[in-house]
Image (cartoon, rainbow, N blue to C red):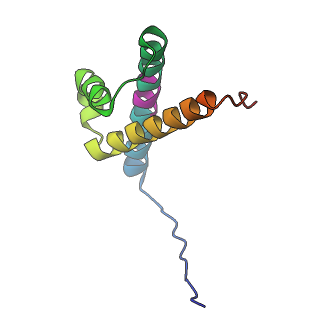
């Protein structure tokens, strides 16, 4: 049997870095919520959600100084998470399962 070691790290960022981290999280949160609402509107109107390419276009369309401050891979990770959650939701609803509360 193989024993795996785990390590726990704690960050102590400076005030400047902590502020930048909070700003990045806020930009990611807003971008995720914007993509979610656009995806829902598209699904209700057309019966299908946005593709990865369409979501990237939405992110690039709303590019401003705030979004440029966040690394592109971080925003793509949020987009991928949104796509996975949408597929899970649609997959569950297509199988006839009741909505979970």
- Residue 41 percent across, percent down from the top left: 46, 13
Which residue appears farthest toward the front when viewing the image?
Answer: 95
Q: Is residue 31 magenta?
A: yes
Q: Residue at x 47, y 40 (%)?
A: 84
Quadrant of res 61: top left
- The answer to whether residue 65 is magenta is no
As drawn, which residue projects farthest toward the top? 45
Q: Which residues are magenta?
A: 29-34
| 35 vs 83: above or below | above
Residue at 47% from the left image edge and 19% from the top image edge: 37
Where is the C terminus found, in terms of image quarters? Answer: top right
Q: Quadrant of the N terminus?
A: bottom right
Q: Nearer the viewer, residue 27 or 60?
A: 60
User: Can the viewer see residue 71 in this picture?
Assistant: no
30 vs 51, nearest the viewer: 51
Residue 53 appears left or right of 22: left
Pinpoint residue 36: horizontal percent, then vertical percent.
Answer: 46, 25
Depth order, front residue of 82/98: 98
Mark count: 0
In the picture provided, is 87 more to the left or to the right than 1?
A: left
The picture places residue 54, in percent across and down from the top left corner, at 29, 25
> From this viewpoint, which residue is outermost toward the bottom?
1
> Residue placed at 41% from the left, 18% from the top?
38
What secondary structure do most residues of the magenta stretch adopt?
Answer: helix
Residue 63, how many percent across, how many down?
24, 25
Which residue is at a point 46% across and 33% down the rendered structure image?
Answer: 29
Q: Is there any visible trace of residue 52 in the rendered image?
A: yes
């Amino acid at each position: 049997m193989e024993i795996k070691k785990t390590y726990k790290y704690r960050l102590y960022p400076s005030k400047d870095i902590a502020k930048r981290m909070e700003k990045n999280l806020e930009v990611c949160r807003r971008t995720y919520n914007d993509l979610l609402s656009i995806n829902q509107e598209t699904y209700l109107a057309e019966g299908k959600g946005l593709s990865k390419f369409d979501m990237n276009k939405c992110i690039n369309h709303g590019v401003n100084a705030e979004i440029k401050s966040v690394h592109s891979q971080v925003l793509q990770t949020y987009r991928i998470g949104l796509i996975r959650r949408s597929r899970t939701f649609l997959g569950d609803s297509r199988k006839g399962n009741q909505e979970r509360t």
